[in-house]
Amino acid sequence: MKKTLLLLTSLLFCTEIVLSQGFYNKNRNRNLVIFAGTGTTHYYGDLAKKGDNSNIQANLGIGARYNFYRWFSAGAEVTWLMLKGNDNTDPGKITRNLSFQSHNFEASGLMYVSLFEEDRRFYMRTFANPYIFGGVGVLSYNPTAKLDGEKYNLRKLKTEAVSYSGIAAVFPLGAGIKFRVNPFLNVALDGAYRFVMTDYLDDVSSGQYPKPASFTDETARKLSDRTWELGVNPTWAEQGKHFRGNPDNRDGYFIFNIKVEYYLSEIGHSSTYRKRIRGGSYKRLKPPKRRTNSQINRKRF
């Protein structure tokens, strides 16, 4: 993770050298911020035990936000993340013997509210600025599990005899703090819980096992009820137990990230023709017109 963060920081420094004519080129409006980061993802669901950290996985994200008015900014973020859960971490569920792992992609639109105003003079911003944020997005997820050393797509096997989509709506809600490193760079720490509109992130939801005779695929039957692997006979599915999952609680996940932010010059606004007026607002001033040689000569004589 340290190597990844160092690489992201180096890339952003290189971008600054390429795009600016000087490091302290403040004659540009810099309300557009791009960022990249990495961190951890903590899964919450039927295959997670409260207080257990063994299911913490990695994530990588990139995005941008635009400071459109003082304390407010809007942005978008794309994140790759991993989710993982296992009954082996919970003595109360260990006999159920279910597990999953998935690679996921999230795309979200976010609204940020900062504690301190971000002035048009971006380089004069406060050293530390806490913020809150929330939004809406979509998650692409695909739970898998291994059987006899081979990985299987659980959604396609319909282990609960239910069809569900691999796309779900998510609602991020979180808070963070950003620190000014230099006029053009921030380092931000933030965390957000994702409320997910599905209970199948882990392929487990129904409280009842499907009847073993209902499966036409032997692999699906084995992955639906894995108590047989621990020598349970008859298996829980054969006993008709109502303990495969809890349909009343939706799954979710928490993301904690460290990000590097870079203030990017806005295309088409390379010169500063904005002047601050009373009340903190700004207006666009026209650049001075260039005089032709004939106009200059006429003025001389």
Image (cartoon, grey):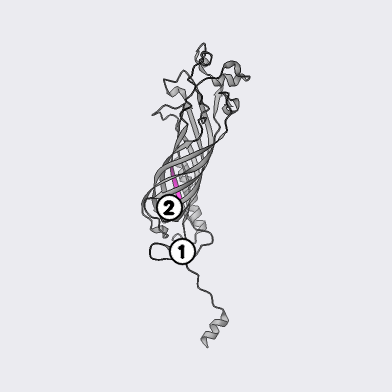
Residue wearing tag 2? 72
Q: Position of residue 120 (x, y in %)?
A: 42, 60
Magenta-tinted stretch? 257-261
Q: Is residue 140 above or below residue 16?
A: above
Task: Give the labeled residue for mark 1.
Answer: 27
User: Where does residue 287 sit, x and y in percent of width and height?
Assistant: 50, 70
Q: Can residue 41 be seen at all in this image of the molecule? A: no
For the question of whether residue 119 can be seen, the reply is: yes
Q: Looking at the image, which is closer to me, 225 or 149?
A: 225
- The image quarter containing residue 157 is top right
The single residue placed furthest to the front in the displayed view is 248
Query: Residue at the location (41% across, 47% down)?
Result: 188
The answer to whether residue 67 is above or below residue 206 is below
Amino acid, disc 2: Phe
Q: Picture quarter containing residue 166?
A: top right
Q: Residue at x 49, y 32 (%)?
A: 83
